[in-house]
Image (cartoon, rainbow, N blue to C red):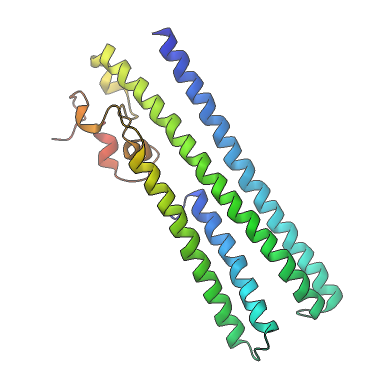
Amino acid sequence: MLTTAPWILVVVTSVLAGVAAGLLARLAGASGPLVPALAGAAGFVVSLVVLGAYEQRKFSHEMETAPVAFALTDEPTGPDRPT
Amino acid sequence: MQFMTTEHFTLQTARAVVNAEISARLQLYMTTLSSSIIALALVAQVSGVLGRAFEAFALVLLPVVYFLGVVTLARLLQASAEWRTYGQGMNRIRHWYLEVAPEMQPYFVLPATDDPWASLAAIGVGSRRVWRGC
């Protein structure tokens, strides 16, 4: 799933959120590299979790509500069918 | 038979259009992102790395690009759902082909079920067993 286009977008966009969070921490007066770095990492993770959860929820909902006329069990039998 | 093959072709074309839209939107977003990074680098040269002007510019630019990423993601998810629906439609038609000529089943490598997971398995996402079971 991580290789799909929406997930790539989620990761790339979350990097932006991390950079913005690090900059904000620096503007807020944090001295040294540790606090901005931690803020950047936190921004990245929060964005990743929020956008990832949104993507996953939407995907799961659509997979569950998709109308199925010919389910797997209704398939005609054939040599490829697993027993 | 002809109207079903026509429908199959229509779905195939619609799927190709959605594919193109997904690629175009991703490409547009990546271009915007790259341009923004270049712009940030230019501002950094003028204001000094991590100077006030750079920080202000970045804090205006980055949220805008982030917003663009989020709306691109939302549209991408809609387009993906559309893409899967067309795949399901083609699978239904393939099911009909097999109803008309069940002896042709060994020649079909793609699913003849419109189960959404089977449609995904056909492109390598999910269980391969589901694909083989179609």
Give the side of residue A33 with respect to residue A81, left or right: right
Could you tell me residue B7's position as x and y percent?
46, 17
Residue A21 to residue B94: above or below: below
Give the quadrant of residue A83.
Answer: top left
Give the side of residue A56 with respect to residue B62, left or right: left
Could you tell me residue B37's position as x and y percent?
72, 63
Residue found at the far bottom of this picture = A31
Could you tell me residue B30's position as x and y percent?
65, 53
Residue found at the far right of this picture = B46
Residue A58 to residue B52: above or below: above
Q: Residue at x 26, y 21 (%)?
A: B105
Q: Residue at x 71, y 58 (%)?
A: B34
Give the side of residue B28 with respect to residue B38, left or right: left
Could you tell me residue A50's position as x and y percent?
48, 63
Residue B99 to residue B28: above or below: above
Q: Residue at x 58, y 81 (%)?
A: A37
Q: Residue at x 46, y 56 (%)?
A: A54
Image mark count: 0
Give the quadrant of residue A29.
Answer: bottom right
Residue found at the far left of this picture = A83
Depth check, front residue: A49 or B31: A49
